[in-house]
């Protein structure tokens, strides 16, 4: 939990700094907006974490988010070119499709030993292409569908705003379920064991293939859930929705201490990583620096063009600090071992005559 | 006489945590001489060669080349002095052609641009020297193992080797390929190149060696000149030590009720089927050289690489090892040879490793049985005397012996019927060894069958009721303990055995 705590304090410091720079950061509307964004990212970042902890990677989540929204719009939207079915039909079909994509990818990776990177890269293009074909490259509006309310409505109101928006509620549900699954069940233990040492897991009789396949199903399923939220939030579905989100999920997981080498990570880590990602995005918009030259008041603001640059720097910084800590720890351990070894010189061999 | 040594190693000592791999070893070498370096697995041959090759520095001792003291800190240091090591596992880039491999790392270039013409011309003359007729443009991946070996030697020659170290060069060669290699070695000897030849095969050593040096337990135990070399002398030097007293007393020979019967089992990659049986409470030792197929046999029985044919009966019922889980459900457990790769998740705790194969049976069903896990692990920690700060300690931070005990504990917590131990004491210090032996005896007394693969002769002799000797993936003989001697096992596993003991009892 060292890593998770470190990032948690980093996020707190960041929030404090942003609030000091610009009090708008602390306004209810902003906090609720950031929490909703972080919740939607967190939902599928947790899914990606399952895959990454087994030592795999899932590049298809962004595309699945897009396809889910497009499918719901196509099936359930009351707008033109859509099929006008009830909302539950659209959501069920979209979720079924998302889960099947995960299942197929998982089976290809575990049974046929294809590389996760390649399978999910192809999966990403296929799924994105499917969304493009369904939308004819255009836009499908959700129109007056009740789904629109999902992202804005919620429990406990404060003025016009729901304090707990539905995406946040869904996120909390996902956290509880995923946290239980990863940290409380035998399945979760197997996920860590496979990432830690696949061969040892196999030699211990763990159903490696099945567990690995399931992590891809979980990842795709949570991407589907996130896709529903994003569809509601955006309202107008193009095939491009969710483009590149898989990298945000990986970044959030890595910032939160999930190791791409496998075997390391946690649900709390993925949550904090997601919050960090969204606070950075929000901070770049809100950051301002007031300074005076010759009695004149100036306000410095960051252009939103800095978003990628700063996100990249933060990810690099997070892994850099972690690695430095690892190297220092290792050195300390080696020194201690050398010390012990030096104090335990082997006794001299007895003389042949005695 | 003493001045014509091109290489002298004096008083070389190398210690690893818990073991002394080399102790005060001397080695000297003349130009144009083939020196055979012999010894059992773990006698220190490869450590000595690693020191000579610059891959590891010695703790004590000195190296002289042409009478001048030298110090090797890196592989390139020893290369500069013309020492080239040809590894047992060929280290080649199979996607590059022959010329590319010969000059890998020392490519002739001008301003960073490869001089392919020079490479090709030089390769051709080198290939001719090692008797290869293929073109330098042939992909290495398409060559036979024998041809690859020749390319390795050509590479060594391109580095202007004066001292060539060949580590088990014939292990993957056919008879004719070996014969060709010997001719080339004769040529090189005539050219004044000194060769250190490591091999377990008696006939090769008899055919090639000008001199033999035998290592045992990290010490140099003897030297034979060409006219003194006989098989018997070498074997007795290699194994000639008293059985140390940490083995439990001999158990009287009993009639164990048969629990495991392996009939005509075809292990993937094996030339022929193998059969043996084992009784309840019996300890069977599997002896043989590295690569004799013992590990593969055990992996087939455990279902890691399911067998392609034959039958296994456990307690009279047919058992088909399709996967490790199937074996585990029959009470057959395997503690693998390579703990770190196959046995343990080093990043996890002792408790998590011990519970791994069984945790799905812990109650309550839908919540990790952490309490039970701790209880089970603590019990193993105590009964096996694992030295750790607690069951929560990471396995990666334990010593080799304690890691091995964790692997054992993992299976002992599940009441084994048949326990397969592959090199149970490799990399384990003496104290932990004795405890592992004691534990094995206790298990045998409880009626648990133990199949023990071991490359340590005295361990096999000290522990086994019967000894299965394997060679080139066949069972060469099955000896009851009363008839087993070090010499008999050694001659069976090196292929120098007599027909009358091959039939077994």
Image (cartoon, helix red, strand yellow):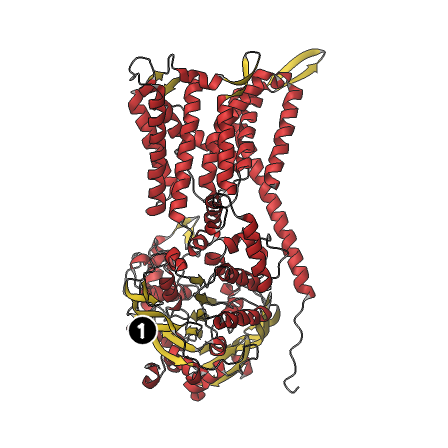
Left or right: B263 in relation to B71: left
Figure check: A242 above or below B425: above
Disc 1 target residue: B180
Question: Residue shown at 56%/32% (left/top)?
Answer: A272
Figure check: B340 above or below A29: below
Left or right: B458 in relation to B10: left
Q: Which chain letter matches label 1?
A: B
Q: Quadrant of residue A54?
A: top left
* Camera-side residue of A66 and B446: B446
Question: Residue shown at 49%/30% (left/top)?
Answer: A173
Q: Position of residue B491 (x, y in %)?
A: 39, 81
Q: Residue furthest right?
A: A295
Count of marks, rendered view? 1
Q: Is residue A42 visible?
A: no
Q: Is residue A96 visible?
A: yes
Q: Quadrant of residue B280?
A: bottom left
Q: Position of residue B247 (x, y in %)?
A: 54, 77
* Camera-side residue of A127 and B452: B452
* Camera-side residue of B481 and B337: B481
Q: Position of residue A85 (x, y in %)?
A: 31, 18
């Amino acid at each position: 939990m060292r890593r998770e705590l470190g990032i948690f304090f980093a996020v707190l410091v960041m929030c404090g700094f942003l609030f000091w720079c610009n009090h708008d950061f602390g306004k209810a509307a902003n906090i609720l907006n950031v929490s909703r964004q972080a919740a939607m990212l967190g939902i599928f970042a947790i899914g990606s974490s399952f895959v990454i902890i087994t030592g795999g990677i899932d590049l298809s989540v962004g595309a699945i988010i897009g396809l889910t929204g497009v499918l719901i719009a196509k099936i359930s939207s009351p707008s033109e070119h859509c099929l006008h079915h009830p909302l539950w039909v659209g959501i069920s079909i979209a979720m079924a499709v998302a889960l099947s994509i995960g299942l197929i990818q998982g089976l290809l990776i575990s049974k046929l030993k294809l590389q996760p990177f390649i399978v999910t890269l192809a999966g990403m293009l296929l799924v994105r292409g499917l969304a493009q074909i369904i939308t004819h490259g255009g836009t499908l509006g959700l129109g007056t569908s009740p789904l629109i309310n999902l992202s804005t409505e919620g429990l406990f109101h404060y003025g016009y705003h729901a304090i707990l928006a539905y995406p946040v509620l869904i996120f909390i549900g996902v956290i509880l379920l995923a946290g239980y699954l990863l940290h409380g069940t035998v399945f979760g233990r197997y996920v860590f064991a496979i990432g830690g040492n696949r061969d040892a897991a196999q030699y211990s009789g763990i159903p490696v293939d099945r567990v690995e396949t399931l992590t891809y199903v979980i990842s795709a399923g949570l991407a589907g859930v996130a896709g529903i939220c994003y569809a509601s939030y955006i309202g107008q579905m193009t095939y491009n929705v969710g483009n590149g989100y898989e990298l945000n999920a990986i970044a959030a997981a890595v910032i939160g201490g999930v190791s791409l080498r496998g075997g390391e990570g946690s649900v709390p880590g993925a949550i904090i990583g997601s919050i960090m990602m969204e606070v950075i995005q929000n901070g770049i918009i809100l950051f301002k620096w007031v300074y005076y030259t010759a009695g004149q008041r100036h306000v410095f603001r960051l252009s939103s063009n800095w978003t990628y640059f700063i996100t990249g720097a933060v990810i690099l910084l997070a892994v850099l600090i972690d690695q430095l800590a690892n190297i220092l720890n290792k050195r300390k351990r080696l020194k201690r071992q050398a010390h012990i070894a030096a104090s335990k010189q082997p006794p001299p061999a007895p003389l042949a005559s005695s | 006489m003493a001045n014509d040594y091109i290489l002298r190693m004096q008083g070389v000592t190398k210690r690893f945590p818990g073991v002394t791999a080399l102790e005060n070893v001397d080695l000297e070498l003349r130009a144009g001489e083939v020196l055979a370096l012999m010894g059992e697995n773990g006698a220190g041959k490869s450590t000595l060669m690693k020191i000579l090759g610059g891959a590891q520095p010695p703790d004590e001792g000195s190296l002289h080349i042409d009478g001048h003291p030298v110090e090797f800190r890196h592989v390139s240091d020893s290369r500069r002095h013309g020492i080239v090591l040809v590894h047992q596992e060929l280290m080649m880039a199979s996607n590059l052609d022959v010329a590319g491999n010969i000059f890998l790392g020392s490519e002739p270039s001008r301003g960073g641009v490869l001089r392919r013409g020079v490479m090709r011309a030089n390769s051709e003359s080198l290939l001719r020297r090692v008797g290869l007729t293929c073109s330098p443009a042939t992909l290495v991946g398409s060559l036979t193992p024998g041809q690859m070996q020749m390319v390795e030697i050509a590479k060594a020659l391109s580095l202007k080797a004066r001292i060539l170290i060949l580590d088990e060069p014939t292990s993957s060669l056919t008879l004719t390929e070996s014969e060709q290699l010997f001719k080339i070695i004769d040529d090189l000897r005539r050219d004044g190149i000194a060769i250190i030849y490591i091999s377990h095969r008696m006939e090769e050593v008899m055919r090639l060696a000008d001199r033999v040096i035998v290592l045992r337990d990290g010490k140099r135990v003897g030297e034979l000149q060409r006219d003194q070399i006989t098989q018997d002398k070498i074997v007795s030097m290699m194994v000639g030590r008293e059985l140390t007293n940490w083995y439990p007393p001999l158990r009287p020979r009993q009639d164990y009720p048969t629990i495991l019967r392996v009939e005509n089992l075809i292990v993937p990659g094996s030339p022929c089927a193998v059969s043996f049986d084992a009784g309840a409470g019996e300890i069977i030792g599997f002896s043989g050289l590295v690569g004799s197929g013992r590990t593969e046999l055990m992996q087939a029985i455990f279902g890691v690489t399911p067998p392609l044919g034959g039958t296994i009966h456990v307690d009279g019922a047919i058992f088909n090892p399709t996967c490790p889980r199937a074996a585990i459900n029959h009470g057959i457990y395997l503690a693998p040879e390579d703990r770190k790769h196959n046995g343990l998740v080093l990043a996890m705790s002792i408790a998590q490793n011990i519970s791994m194969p069984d945790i799905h049976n812990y109650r309550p069903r839908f919540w990790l049985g952490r309490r039970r896990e701790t209880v089970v692990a603590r019990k193993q920690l105590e009964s096996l005397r694992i030295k750790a700060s607690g069951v929560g300690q990471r396995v990666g931070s334990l010593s080799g012996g304690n890691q091995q005990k964790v692997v054992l504990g993992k299976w002992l917590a599940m009441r084994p019927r048949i326990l397969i131990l592959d090199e149970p004491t490799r990399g384990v210090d003496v104290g932990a060894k004795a405890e592992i032996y004691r534990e094995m005896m206790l298990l045998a007394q409880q009626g648990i069958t133990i199949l023990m693969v071991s490359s340590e002769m005295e361990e096999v002799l000290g522990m086994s009721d019967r000894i299965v000797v394997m060679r080139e993936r066949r069972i060469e003989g099955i000896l009851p303990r009363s008839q087993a001697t070090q010499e008999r096992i050694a001659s069976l596993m090196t292929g120098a055995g007599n027909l009358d003991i091959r039939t077994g009892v």
